Image (spheres, rainbow, N blue to C red):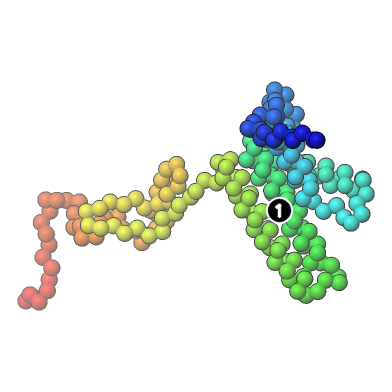
Amino acid sequence: MTKAKAPVKESKEQPARAHKLDSSNPKLTYLGGSRFDAWNGTVANQALSSAWYGNNPDADRSHKLQSAGLSFLTGVEPKDELEGMLAAQLLASHNAAMECYRRAMISEQTFEGRKENLNQANKLSRTHATLLEALNRHRGKGQQKVTVEHVHVHSGGQAIVGNVEGGGVRTKSENQPHALGYAPGQTMRSENAARAAVPIAGDAER
């Protein structure tokens, strides 16, 4: 008679507790931007896996392509994990776009196949540009610039005519001859306030 096996108790231990995270001596920070090489190595391998190495890649060609990919990640110089992800996705979107462009140029390619590959390449190129913009914005390089084209000034109000930028106002009223220097409805004063008004000749007898 066989004994019934005791039910296996599910472990309540969190998965992260099974790993020892050591940030004392990272060697791959230049690839993934993290103080932890487990992350840096994972991101680098994901980026390298996005490349197409051919149907029958030889070791020398694969090594060169992988070295090129690692050179790109190093050149981006990610400063944290977010920049490491964006750098990897930039490489992946570039590789995917170039693969679509390559497929579109195959001589035996049908018209519909060529059209679809170029369409996908176009989308991937726009995604690449969006990722680059996100990286620059994360690094603080995407400063916004607002230019005021039209100014409406109501009676009794004041306005600044010029280009409004983040960091100050540069007045360029000399470049806007149509700009008003006074509020509509406000009487312009003469330089000599004590000077008598000159009557305007109308239908009076001469």
Instruction: State the residue position of label 1.
Output: 93
Q: Which residue is drawn at the image coordinates 79% and 51% (left, top)?
A: 51
Q: Which residue is drawn at the image coordinates 66% and 53% (left, top)?
A: 128
Is the C terminus in the top left, top right, bottom left or bottom right quadrant? bottom left
- x%, y% of residue 105? 81, 67
Q: Nearer the viewer, residue 173 or 183?
A: 183
| Vertical position of residue 112 compared to residue 61: above or below | below
**Residue 26 in view (yes/no):** yes
| Vertical position of residue 20 compared to residue 124: above or below | above
Q: Residues within 10 Å of mark 1 (few under 14, many from 20)?
A: many
Residue at the extreme left: 205
- x%, y% of residue 28? 74, 32
Residue at the extreme front: 1
- x%, y% of residue 200? 13, 68
**Residue 74 in view (yes/no):** no
Is the N terminus in the top left, top right, bottom left or bottom right quadrant? top right
Q: Nearer the viewer, residue 54 or 69?
A: 54
Classify residue 23 as left or right of residue 152.
Answer: right
Classify residue 159 as left or right of residue 35.
Answer: left
| Vertical position of residue 204 compared to residue 61: above or below | below
Tag 1: residue type?
Ser
Q: Count numbered badges in the picture.
A: 1
Q: Which residue is drawn at the image coordinates 55% and 41% (left, top)?
A: 140
